[in-house]
């Protein structure tokens, strides 16, 4: 009986100012519970840790409601159905959805669609791949690049956060589509991996000095940037705007350099480059493409199988490590998609 199972959870205790610390979280324990008619109980196996989570902790209007104080922290993950009163899900099914930072997710019938609870096939990809290339980061990279970036063979695609979850998908996909792929990442090891393992044409180490990005763009994007996929914002966005080609497309996916600011977010100073180069800059939220995820999964799982695309994950174990694991995203410590393993 699932009512005898203990559920360890991580709840938002208070909203962070700057970087979130362990003090912002409350660890709670309660019975896992039994699903009502139409509901399911899911045992969490692994959770996706994403930069967007920092934004969900803030109060205020956004593309998704903030996590309430006292609520289980929102997180996407992969789990196993352990009890079901819904004919669409059988005990033992492996599912993806918004499970939250907890060991068990009790999902009532009316929440199944909102949680995006979907059966997944581990023959198509591993659990960590379903949280990376085949999951939300991969969907973000795919639809941001293909729908907004509209890459054409021979164009130069620049992506910041190139060694991260979204960035690695964007660059590899750009190469598959016949483009020149240039990454920006932090540290020599990440840049070497991006070029040697993922097949980017070049990667700029933004930690190599104050002029590293500007000089790197001169060297590696001599004809300008046709598509810029921005995951970081701030000074790197400004540097990219200064190197736009005529008719460039900029995808605003995230601004990880700004998320922990205690002062107002700094907007781009070089925005007039959009006018001069007849360029456009557009924001994207992956949830807008939910009805087409299956198409991207089908395409990119083929690339994983034939070796044209690789998927690297940085796995941290134990739900109790969540506060420190999340911080790795903002210090640049993670190498690849950050995943929190909760159970086998």
Image (cartoon, grey):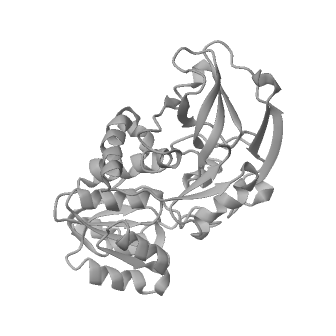
Count of marks placed on residues:
0
Task: Give percent across and percent down for residue 130.
Answer: 48, 44
Task: Give percent across and percent down for residue 339.
Answer: 58, 53
Q: Is residue 131 left or right of residue 12?
A: left
Which quadrant would the C terminus be assigned to in this image? Answer: top right
Task: Give percent across and percent down for residue 190.
Answer: 47, 73
Compared with 202, 33 (above or below) is: above
Residue at horizontal 40%, vertical 72%? 184
Residue 269 seen in this snapshot: no
Compared with 60, 195 (above or below) is: below
Compared with 184, 28 (above or below) is: above
Residue 99 seen in this snapshot: yes
Q: Is residue 97 left or right of residue 295?
A: right
Residue at horizontal 62%, vertical 37%? 99
Task: Decide which of 168, 54 is in the foreground and name it.
Answer: 168
Residue at horizontal 44%, vertical 44%? 125
Compared with 83, 224 (above or below) is: below
Q: Quadrant of residue 4?
A: top right
Task: Give percent across and percent down for residue 147.
Answer: 28, 47
Task: Decide which of 326, 62 is in the foreground and name it.
Answer: 326
Which quadrant would the N terminus be assigned to in this image? Answer: top right
């Amino acid at each position: 009986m699932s009512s005898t199972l203990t559920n360890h959870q991580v709840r938002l205790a208070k909203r962070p100012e700057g970087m979130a610390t362990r003090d912002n979280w409350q660890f709670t324990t309660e019975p896992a519970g039994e699903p009502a008619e139409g509901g399911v109980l899911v045992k969490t196996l692994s959770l996706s840790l994403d930069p967007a989570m920092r934004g969900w902790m803030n109060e205020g209007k956004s593309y998704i409601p903030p996590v309430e104080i006292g609520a289980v922290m929102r997180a996407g993950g992969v789990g196993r159905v352990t009890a079901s009163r819904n004919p669409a899900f059988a005990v033992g099914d492996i599912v993806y959805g918004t499970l939250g930072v907890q060991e068990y997710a009790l999902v009532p019938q009316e929440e199944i669609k909102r949680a995006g609870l979907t059966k997944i096939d581990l023959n198509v990809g591993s659990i960590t791949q379903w949280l990376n290339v085949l999951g939300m980061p991969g969907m973000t990279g795919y639809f941001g690049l293909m729908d907004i970036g509209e890459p054409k063979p021979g164009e130069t695609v620049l992506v910041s956060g190139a060694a991260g979850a979204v960035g690695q998908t964007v660059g590899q996909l750009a190469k598959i589509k016949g483009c020149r792929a240039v990454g920006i990442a932090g540290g020599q090891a990440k840049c070497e991996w991006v070029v040697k393992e993922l097949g980017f044409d070049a990667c700029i180490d933004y930690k190599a000095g104050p002029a590293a990005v500007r000089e790197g763009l001169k060297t590696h994007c001599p004809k300008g940037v046709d598509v810029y996929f921005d995951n970081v914002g701030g000074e790197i966005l400004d540097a990219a705007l200064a190197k736009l080609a005529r008719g460039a497309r900029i995808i605003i996916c995230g601004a990880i350099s700004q998320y922990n600011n205690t002062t107002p977010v700094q907007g781009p100073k070089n925005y007039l480059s959009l006018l001069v180069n007849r360029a456009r800059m557009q924001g994207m939220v992956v949830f807008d493409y939910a009805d087409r995820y299956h198409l991207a999964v089908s395409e990119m799982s083929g690339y994983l199988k034939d070796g044209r695309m690789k998927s690297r994950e940085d796995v941290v174990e134990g739900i109790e490590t969540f506060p420190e694991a999340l911080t790795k995203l903002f210090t640049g410590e993670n190498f690849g998609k950050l995943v929190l393993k909760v159970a086998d």
